Amino acid sequence: MVVESISMPGAKDLDSTTITPRRELEDCNHLLDDHAALMRFHDEQGYILLRGVLDPASVEETRKAMFAVMERHGLIEPGNTDGTWTGKPFPGGMEESPEFSGIARRLIENPANQKLMEKILGEPACIIPIVQYRTYPPGGSITGAHQDGFYSPGIRNYKPVWTTLTPCPREVGGLMVAVGQCNRGFLHNLAKTPSPIPEGVIPEDSWATTDYYPGDVLILNPYAPHASMPNTSKYCRVTLDTRVQSAADPRVLLADIVSASPDAITVRDLAGAERTFTVDDDTFIRIEHPGVRQKRADYVPSAPAGKRIVVVFDGNHAETLRRASDN
């Protein structure tokens, strides 16, 4: 039975720290040259795990670039190469910091990695301007159980791309996936804000994880429930999340707001062209915070002229309005 949505006002929220993955994620390298088979696995199991497929030099360049930011904030010692934490308190909130600007784009646009993304997508790919850079020390942030598609409606022909820049065994806090749970619709609790997944909705024996290594790529089905595990090691968890979409039929636009109203928004893209999109109750608005939905009736004060946002669109309809992150 497909569950289109859940409304459980009295339900207890699922605490991802109580989840113990009982299964091992399977690698899909053998399916990489058979796109139909790769997508069947993705659609049925909810993920694609590819081992050691990113260009090694590009991965090392990306690690060094992220480590330079971490050094400036005292998370690691100068010259460190394995991400050993210094013990310095970390305030967090840097996932979309402009200090990381350009790092993900250089990784994805490496020619060898572009060919890989084309195999994954089944057509030429381009990066989506939504990136999160994770530099989490031991005991740091944990991403709770969620489905990406719930927070990013309207994106078609896209794939989220998660990769680690240093070894990420279980104790460093890699991702776990509820395997085979991607065909049940959205499992988020609409009776609560910000709509957490309730306890007991996902079978305990469906959760799986693995030890990840630099060069690995994890692609998640937008409906696949997933979460991060606690970092109980002595190392920082150094990973990044980005997305790629169809280059021929892009549905995501990075632009600056020209004007906004409860019913429409006009933006100017980076080439200088203006477009106007309708906004309605189906538009998922999260301009103030990347994970909290705003009401259409009162989002306008958070959308001043000149503010850079991401617009996910279908024709002239805004499917999602999201705070931009500089990739």
Image (tube, rainbow, N blue to C red):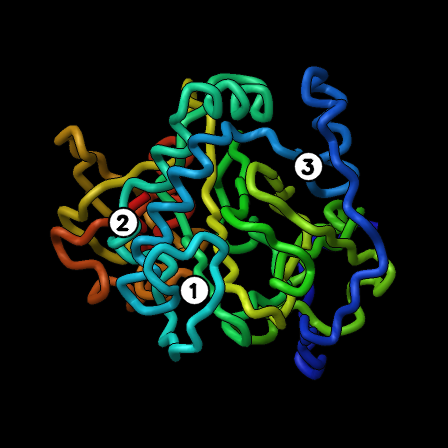
Q: Position of residue 268 (x, y in %)?
A: 17, 38
- Compared to 144, does 35 lie above or below? above
Crowd rating for badge 2 (residues with CA inside 10 Å; few <14, some 14–19, many 20+): many
Say which of marks 1 and 3 sits in front: 3
- The amino acid type found where label 3 is placed reads Ile
- Of residues 321 and 234, the one nearer the viewer is 234
Q: Answer yes or no: do the residues labelled 3 and 2 have beta carbons within 8 Å?
A: no
In this figure, which residue is indicated by the disc labeled 3?
Answer: 48
Q: Position of residue 220 (x, y in %)?
A: 63, 43
- The amino acid type found where label 1 is placed reads Arg
In this figure, which residue is indicated by the disc labeled 1?
Answer: 293
Sequence-first disc among 2 and 1: 1
Q: Is residue 295 visible?
A: no
Crowd rating for badge 1 (residues with CA inside 10 Å; few <14, some 14–19, many 20+): many
In this figure, which residue is indicated by the disc labeled 2?
Answer: 309
Residue ID at (73%, 51%): 210
Residue ID at (69%, 65%): 6
- Secondary structure found at label 1: loop
Q: Quadrant of residue 133?
A: bottom left
- Compared to 320, does 189 lie above or below? below
- Secondary structure found at label 2: strand
- Of residues 229 and 127, the one nearer the viewer is 229
